[in-house]
Amino acid sequence: MKGIVGKKLGMTQVFDEETGTVTPVTVIQAGPCPVVAVRTRDEDGYDAVQLAFDEVPERKLTKPKLGYLAKHEVGPHRRLLEIRGASELTPGETVTVESFEPGDRVKVSGVSIGKGFAGTIKRHNFSSGPKTHGSRNIRAPGSIGASATPSRVFKGMRMAGHMGAKRITQVGLRVHSIDPEQNLLLVKGAVPGPKNGLVEVREEARGGGS
């Protein structure tokens, strides 16, 4: 399983002079990510690789975290993430964007942009009620259950509430190009999260996407 941790810088367009096509891409500053630890099914019960990202001064980390990183001979980094799956990496190696190639299928995970409190029309795409003839049900959610039986609201009922700010994985993406000198990974299409948001890029095991 190939994977890397990065920061979403934003979106731009790439122009192909030969074909004249314009491709929307997301620019991700990915890595370099030192390998801190490797989990195995025999010792830990699952396969994964723990990567470090976002190098910072020592004063910005707690002593327990500094001690953990020093134990594995890794400098101070703000982020520690595990990427599930079997891998041939070993502690001490460094994962860079060069582990990916243009055309690779990938999936990108991140925390979506928070929208705050939202009603059912914006949050769940509900239809609005009648807007004339004295209607008082223009943007109201409508019935949420019967009164006598079962005399309660079922769990999972789609209602107003906090929208966004949850983990989202976008599948079916492709790597457009890489820039090893600047540690940039250009992914065709949009990925979850705001600008400067933390994202995980992993290879796509299943088919699909373009």
Image (cartoon, rainbow, N blue to C red):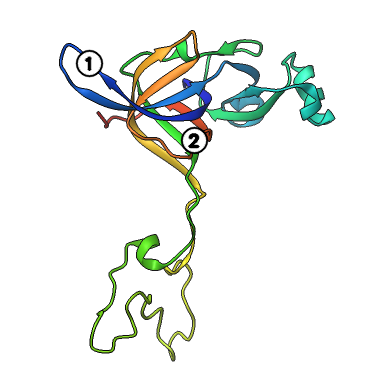
* Label 1 vs 2, first from the N-terminus: 1
Do the residues under discs 1 and 2 have CB atoms within 8 angstroms? Answer: no
The single residue placed furthest to the right in the displayed view is: 63
What's the amino acid at mark 1? Answer: Asp
* Secondary structure of the residue carrying numbered label 1: loop
Given residues 83 and 96, the one toward you in this image is 96
What's the amino acid at mark 2? Answer: Lys
Given residues 24 and 67, the one toward you in this image is 24
- Residue 202 location (% of width, % of height): 45, 26
The single residue placed furthest to the left in the displayed view is: 19
The single residue placed furthest to the top in the displayed view is: 181
Name the image quarter holding residue 106. top left
In whole angstroms, how far apart are the C-alphas of marks 1 and 2? 25 Å
- Quick check: 140 left or right of 130? right
- Quick check: 153 left or right of 105? right
- Residue 206 location (% of width, % of height): 33, 30
| Residue 195: numbered disc | 2
Given residues 98 and 12, the one toward you in this image is 12
Residue occupied by mark 1: 16
Where, quadrant-wise, is the C terminus in this rendering?
A: top left
Q: Residue at x 28, y 89 (%)?
A: 134
Q: Residues within 10 Å of mark 2 (few under 14, many from 20)?
A: some
